[in-house]
Image (cartoon, rainbow, N blue to C red):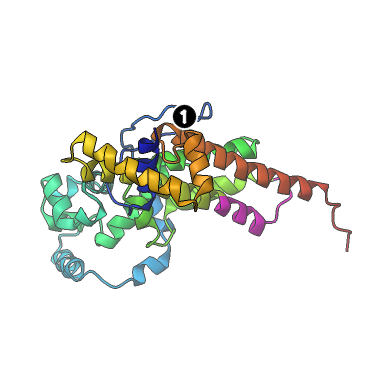
Amino acid sequence: MYEKQTAAMTSRFQTLGEGAAPYRADKARPGGEVSAMEPEVTPVEPEDEELWAPFLAYRPGDRRAERLRAHAREDAKRGQRHAPRRASALSRDEIVRTAIAVADAEGAEAVNMRRIARELGSGTMSLYWHVASKDELLDMMIDAIVGDAQAPEPSGDWRADLRAGACTTRDALHRHQWAVNFMTARPPAGPKQLRNLERSLGALDGLGLDKATALTTLMAVTTYVLGAVLREQQEANGERYMAELFEDVPEAEKQAVIREFVQRIRTSGHFPQMVAMLDEGVDPDAAETRDERFEFGLDCLLDGIATRLSRVAAQPPPAPA
């Protein structure tokens, strides 16, 4: 028992990486079983074109993309004002879905225009009729994943809406594990992100909150979800690390190493709380309790928000000017 617990605790010190098994919270009840999920991606809508933040255009340019776009402009001057037949056979949605599949399998660093063209059986030039650059493609990939984790339409029950959105976001981030770290390096400026924000703010409408407080409330939930997913991926990566570390070590030798480490903890006298946890059989990284632990923390956060909201409701309305 101690050996398993200590191996689990060791995993929390391992670095994040790609490839840990995805998890899903059963939103119908706390502590639902963990289950794998297949990737799903919301289509890229043509009307979204007008909803991308303008500052994205001011990033450092992709020289290859600029060169190919220059060729396209020259084609247009010569009268070829529509995409050639091979490019017309593609769609932006297909390109984005293919890129996400590559990133899911091999990590975001594997995504480049040449690789995606090869996956689609197309020429790289054909992709540039639909996507301006690799940076734009990566933005679309993140926005498509956000669309997959679409916030629910406001139901009138703010707590149920925020809870459902948090669980859906967690599911999506575990399906696309590369996205968590990647999202932190890109501005949250996509059309689907705007729609999710609008819906989520709508869930808090009518509660007497000013918009700054409503936004801060949503940020608190989002921050919790991102932190929880990072922690869960760290746990899973730690499990994989330990399995690889002891892959060629005989079981008896592995158990002896772990027992010796546990004994050092117990006899040092410096870790009474950790020893008590071991004595109670607590495994802080147990895969079977990840849903339960996530939902416990989420409910604690929502309880705190509810308490704050009750204080707002108890305040008298401002006196008329």
Horizontally, residue 184 falls left or right of residue 293, namely left
Q: Quadrant of residue 130?
A: bottom left
Secondary element at tag 1: loop
Residue 288: x and y in percent read 41, 31
Horizontally, residue 106 falls left or right of residue 169, namely left
Q: Quadrant of residue 137?
A: bottom left
Residue 171: x and y in percent read 41, 38
Residue 285 in magenta?
Answer: no
Q: Which residues are magenta?
A: 206-220
Quarter holding the N terminus is: top left
Q: Quadrant of residue 318?
A: bottom right
Residue bearing mark 1: 26
Residue 9: x and y in percent read 40, 45
Seen in the picture, residue 57 relative to 183 is either above or below; the reply is below
Residue 210 in magenta?
Answer: yes
- Residue 83 in view, yes or no: no
State the residue lying farthest toward the front.
Answer: 267
Q: Main secondary structure of the magenta part?
A: helix
- Name the residue nearer the viewer: 70 or 310: 310
Q: Residue at x 79, y 46 (%)?
A: 313
Seen in the picture, residue 74 relative to 170 is either above or below; the reply is below
Quarter holding the C terminus is: bottom right
Residue 259: x and y in percent read 33, 40
Three-letter amino acid code of the residue under disc 1: Asp
- Residue 69 in view, yes or no: yes
Q: Residue at x 16, y 70 (%)?
A: 67
Q: Residue at x 24, y 46 (%)?
A: 91
Q: Residues within 10 Å of mark 1 (few under 14, many from 20)?
A: some
Horizontally, residue 57 falls left or right of residue 215, namely left
Horizontally, residue 247 falls left or right of residue 309, namely left
- Name the residue nearer the viewer: 231 or 315: 231
